Image (cartoon, rainbow, N blue to C red):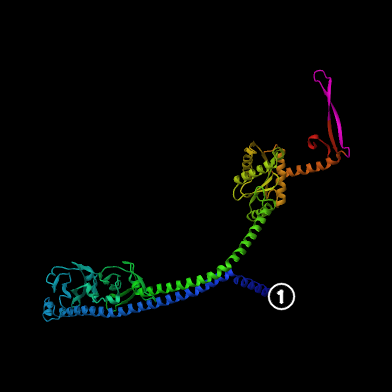
Amino acid sequence: MKFRKIRQLARASFKHWLDRLVEAHLLFPLTTLFLLCIIWGTAAYIILLDRNTAERAAIFSSRELLETYEAQAVRRLHEIDQTLKFIKYTYELKHDRNVLRELGDKALLPSDMLFAVTLTDETGNVLASTQPHERGNIYDASLFDVVRTEDTLYVSPPRRAGSDWKLLFGRRLAENGRFSGTVTATIDAAYFVSGYQNSKLGQQGLLGILGRDGVFKAARIGDNFFVGEAVDFDDVMAQASTKTPLLMSPWDSVARYTAVHELNDFPLAVIVGLSQEEQLADSQGRMWGTILRAMLTSIVVVMFLNLLHRANKQRALNRQYEREAAMEHAARVEYLAYHDGLTALPNRSLFSKLLAQGIAQAKRNNRQMAILFLDLDHFKQINDTLGHEAGDQLLQEVARRLREGLRESDTVARLGGDEFVVLLPELEEIKFAGVVAEKILKAIAKPFILMEQEFRVTTSIGISIYPKDGLDEETLKKHADIAMYQAKGEGKNHYHFYSEQLNIHSLERLTLESSLRHALERSEFQLHYQAKRDTRTGAITGMEALLRWQHPHLGMVEPMKFI
């Protein structure tokens, strides 16, 4: 039975939503949306596919160019290193500073136009050089620190020489295994990027030699040669090894598809970067063409479906207006059911709900709350003297003053006639209820302008506290009412807290009132006469009648208690 009921509910729900979907005001927009999703989904797929193809081609081209450039750079580096090794071998064999001149005479050295070779002793003094002006001491701490203990190729950072940038390559010289000097070759840094192919790399393509310290030894972008720019070497190597090696150059903020390879025999890496903007330019042009076609197709589809939709739109709008009117009417009916029509305050029904909720919350949070029961003094005289219109105006003004004088968390309601009630939730101390009551008394005591005349009205307030004076709403309201009547009995324009003594007094009053109705029938009243005498002469000047009530259970009841 349970599963059958579930299936019935599911079937009913499905039928309900199916009926909604086939309604005109939903069917046409959903159809339009569906077709637009197909159009733009297809366009997005074509654009994405074309972009991925162009991106893969750019990555492949960068790696292909890197292989070509690496072969060229390694060949030149090996040529430099072999030259240094040859000079090192020859010098260590002969220990003759004239070895450079001899090798040059035999055409065993590269041309001076390509690079300059220099021999120094262990302190940096020049022993020989292919450049005649190279004399004196050229001690280089970074070079000597490396080659003093290691027989390895040293590559210096870029150095400015006039308007050119140079790179210094060096190796150690040894005599009987002991460090005895250096052999260096100074080469124009642009030599390593002279094979730049503008047609393949583009105007923003990058070609360069990168040191392991992250500093470019030589690089070229377009027709611009530069050196010394720094990057994070490890980050570049890591990003270049990813599936999409797209790097943002820190010096020009150009995104490039980058290929990097670290050279095995040298402390260097070759790097090639193809500008994303240039490589995807054709793809970008095709993308806008695809978007334009999708837009034109979308416009045609939307216009066609809009013509169909407009024919049914008015009927759907009319149905919507009817539903909205019904909802507004229901909301209005609900509002009137829980609010006073004259003052727009919550009525007795809504206040009872709010009070019940407040009691539950106060109980849960172990907090106090207060109820203030208000009754306007001499309100009947206003109605009898000025009429009900003035009385209604007075009640509206009283409601406004109460709302303005209370916190947003407090609740003020009209129970009927001239009776109002205030709910103070989250009461920290009982005395604060008295403070609020004083504030209300002062607000009500201010003059009222009714029928273009000034009148003053006061109010009497009774206060009961949760949980001290009651644990349920009826008890709290009854005790606040008892306290209010006590305030009226004490002269009005006053507030009074409920106490158990008031309840005893109230029960006694009800008992006396009930017995008083039968006192005459049972002849329980007794009349006593008391003479009045002149204190000077002792003569009787008159008498007074005194009424006494002989109650069968309470005994003699004094006049002040029953009159």
Residue 396 at what x, y percent from top left?
Answer: 65, 45
- Left or right? Give the position of 393 relative to 138: right
Residue 286 at what x, y percent from top left?
Answer: 39, 75
Q: Let me know if residue 553 appears in the view.
A: no
Q: In which quarter of the image is the N terminus?
A: bottom right
Residue 3 at what x, y percent from top left?
Answer: 68, 75
Nearer to me, 121 or 134: 134
- Left or right? Give the position of 293 relative to 30: left
Identity of the residue drawn at 83% across and 23% down? 542
Could you classify mark 1 by the number of other residues whose Cα lies within 10 Å: few (under 14), some (14-19), or many (20 or more)?
few
Q: Is residue 331 above or below residue 261?
A: above
Residue furthest out toward the top: 537
Three-letter code, disc 1: Met
Q: Disc 1 on helix, strand or loop?
A: loop
Image quarter for residue 266?
bottom left
Q: Is residue 86 magenta?
A: no
Residue 351 at what x, y percent from top left?
Answer: 67, 52
- Which secondary structure class fits the magenta region best? strand
Nearer to me, 314 or 371: 314
Identity of the residue drawn at 74% across and 44% down? 503
Nearer to me, 176 or 344: 344
Q: Give the range drawn in magenta.
A: 521-545
Q: Is residue 522 magenta?
A: yes
Identity of the residue drawn at 33% across and 79% down? 61
Q: Let me know if residue 358 appears in the view.
A: yes
Image quarter for residue 12?
bottom right
Residue furthest out toward the right: 522
- Left or right? Give the position of 124 relative to 547: left
Q: In this view, does 561 lie above or below 40?
A: above
Nearer to me, 502 or 338: 338
Q: Is residue 472 above or below residue 394?
A: below
Which residue is tagged 1?
1
